[in-house]
């Protein structure tokens, strides 16, 4: 569908589909027409109408050549012609991004001119600029640290899927200027602005960050981070990691709250991710997310992210199903991951999901390299850190390393709804190491965060049973069975068969502590 406007402006260019075609603004501010062919202009028109979005080759071919039968090479020729004109003198790479096999994405912010005096900015979804953080320390001298926070945040946010981040060099042109978010949004074509400050006092540093809706100049989220000064680089890394992890979910929440007519694949992907973030271990939200990812895949069958997200959702749902249904879900997840990696062999998220699937299948040695790929792309991915922690411990690694990795994840994302499992996992490690009181403290935190998750209650039943507090053990076991709603863990024999944490490296401790505790809680043998 063509847009109602016929004039689009981006950077120093103007595309007038009914007038001068493509023109470029000169030093005097006048637009000078450029010699570009009509077919090339048609391709550009399709791209700018959907600036910031992936436009598949098939969509461009259908819109430009309609029913004519032409070779794909024709599109490649037109893209090359556009790049020769648009990328001339450009210092930050091409304005047309090639998405391997699938299509192209137009990167500059575009202004759609509905009328001569009323331009409308087309800001790509999940587009943001990180403004230079201010140094508010009493004696100053911390601007280098504030600039480091800005640089790292720009880099970390750029790693998030579908997030378009304005370059550091452009963002720093606003340093020490008093410009409101609406003006910045108009000038840069972004939906969101992140601003903040650094204040150091003695051995303490405080970082404040605020997310602003550029269209309305309203604050969507604000957070304060306090930290002791030690290794300044490590402090900077942890703070920026925490902000980026939190902000990733805040952006998705803000974007999915916007009304949408005729949702596309990206809308369904973002809604599915938001549903998972709200799940807190609840199966209904996991099922809702899986359904949304199914819609995304139906709209874009070649989408690597849709394949990966749906595979992850199927793995999550498989836990609550009978063995046959679980096997079917896991088989489909494997097929989806194979398709995704065939298209995009280096996709870090797909490698992460593959690692989860391998870990649950007790193939932890094979899973560890998958998580290493995910962490190489984003060293501050808290979920990958916990999965790596599990694999290392379940293959005979150090309990202290496993706990340290998980505690790092908690520091990086202290309000993450997944933390109920992170607390539970630390409690589980303490339990297998016979540190029962420490185990119970962590497990209680896990079920406090997510009262509907059954896992903490099962582990608490084992911990209290091993400690000899049988009444508490029985109460936790009964609650765990009620929340689970199946007979998957109804006997010791079923627990042995169905638990993915019963690996050879920890089996002796698992039997002498966990199983012994479950027996004391009243779990029957058969």
Image: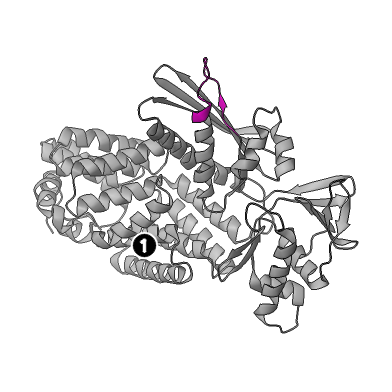
Task: Judge whether 422 appears above or below 95 on screen.
Answer: above
- The image's colouring method is one colour
Q: Magenta span covers which residues?
A: 132-145
Tell me what residue is drawn at x 75 percent, y 83 percent: 68
Tell me what residue is drawn at x 54 percent, y 57 percent: 269
Task: Judge whether 282 appears above or below 19 on screen.
Answer: above
Q: Secondary structure at mark 1?
A: helix
Q: Position of residue 461 (x, y in %)?
A: 20, 42
Residue 344 can be seen, yes or no: yes
Q: Few, some or many C-alpha atoms within 10 Å of disc 1 (few <14, some 14-19, many ≥20)?
A: many
Tell me what residue is drawn at x 16 percent, y 52 percent: 396
Q: Position of residue 76 (x, y in %)?
A: 67, 73
Which image quadrant: the N terminus?
bottom right
Tell me what residue is drawn at x 11 percent, y 51 percent: 511
Task: Judge whether 39 appears above or below 369 on screen.
Answer: below
Residue 144 forms part of the magenta stretch: yes
- Res 5 → quadrant: bottom right
Q: Nearer the viewer, residue 324 or 76?
A: 76
Q: Main secondary structure of the magenta part?
A: loop
Residue under numbered circle 1: 354
Task: Judge whether 202 appears above or below 506 on screen.
Answer: above
Residue 34 forms part of the magenta stretch: no
Left or right for 423, reference 27: left
Which image quadrant: the C terminus?
bottom left
Q: Position of residue 96 (x, y in %)?
A: 66, 61
Residue 478 can be seen, yes or no: no
């Amino acid at each position: 569908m063509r847009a109602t406007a016929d004039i689009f402006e981006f950077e120093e260019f103007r595309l007038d589909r009914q007038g001068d075609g493509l023109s470029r603004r000169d030093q005097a501010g006048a637009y000078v027409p450029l010699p570009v062919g009509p077919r090339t202009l048609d391709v550009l028109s399709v791209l700018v109408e959907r600036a910031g979005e992936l436009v598949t080759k098939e969509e461009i071919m259908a819109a430009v050549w309609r029913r004519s039968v032409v070779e794909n090479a024709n599109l490649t020729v037109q893209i090359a012609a556009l790049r020769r004109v648009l990328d001339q003198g450009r210092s930050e790479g091409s304005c047309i991004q090639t998405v391997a096999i699938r299509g192209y994405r137009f990167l500059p912010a575009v202004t759609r001119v509905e009328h001569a005096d009323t331009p409308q900015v087309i800001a790509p979804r999940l587009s943001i600029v990180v403004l230079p953080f201010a140094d508010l320390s009493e004696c100053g001298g911390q601007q280098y640290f504030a600039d480091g926070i800005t640089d790292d945040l720009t880099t970390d946010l750029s790693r998030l899927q579908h997030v378009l981040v304005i370059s550091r060099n452009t963002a720093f042109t606003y340093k020490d200027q008093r410009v409101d978010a609406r003006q910045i949004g108009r000038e840069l074509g972004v939906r969101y602005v992140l601003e903040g400050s650094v204040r150091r006092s003695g051995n303490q540093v405080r970082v404040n960050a605020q997310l602003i809706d550029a269209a309305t100049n309203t604050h969507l989220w604000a957070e304060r981070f306090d930290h002791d000064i030690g290794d300044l680089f490590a402090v900077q890394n942890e703070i920026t990691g925490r902000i980026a992890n939190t902000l990733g979910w805040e952006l998705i929440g803000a974007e999915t709250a916007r009304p949408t007519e005729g949702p596309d694949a990206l809308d369904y992907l973002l809604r599915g991710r938001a549903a998972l973030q709200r799940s807190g271990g609840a199966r209904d939200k996991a099922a809702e997310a899986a359904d949304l990812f199914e819609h995304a895949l139906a709209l874009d069958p070649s989408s690597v992210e849709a394949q990966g997200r749906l595979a992850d959702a199927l793995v999550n749902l498989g836990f609550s199903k009978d063995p046959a249904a679980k096997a079917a879900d896991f088989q489909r997840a494997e097929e989806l991951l194979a398709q995704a990696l065939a298209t995009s062999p280096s996709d870090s998220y797909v490698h992460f999901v593959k690692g989860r699937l391998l870990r649950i299948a007790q193939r932890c040695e094979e899973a560890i390299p998958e998580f290493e790929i995910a962490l190489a792309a984003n060293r501050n991915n808290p979920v990958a850190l916990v999965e790596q922690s599990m694999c290392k411990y379940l293959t005979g690694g150090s309990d202290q390393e496993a706990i340290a990795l998980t505690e790092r994840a908690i520091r990086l994302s202290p309000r993450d709804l997944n933390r109920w499992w992170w607390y539970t996992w630390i409690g589980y490690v303490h339990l297998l190491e016979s540190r029962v009181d420490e185990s119970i403290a962590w497990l209680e935190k896990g079920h406090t965060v997510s009262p509907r998750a059954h896992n903490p209650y099962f582990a608490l039943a084992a911990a209290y049973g091993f400690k000899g507090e049988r009444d508490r053990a029985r109460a936790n076991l009964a609650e765990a069975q009620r929340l689970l709603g199946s007979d998957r863990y109804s006997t010791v024999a079923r627990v042995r068969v169905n638990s993915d944490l019963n690996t050879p490296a920890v089996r002796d401790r698992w039997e002498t502590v966990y199983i012994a505790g479950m027996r004391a809680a009243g779990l029957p043998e058969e």
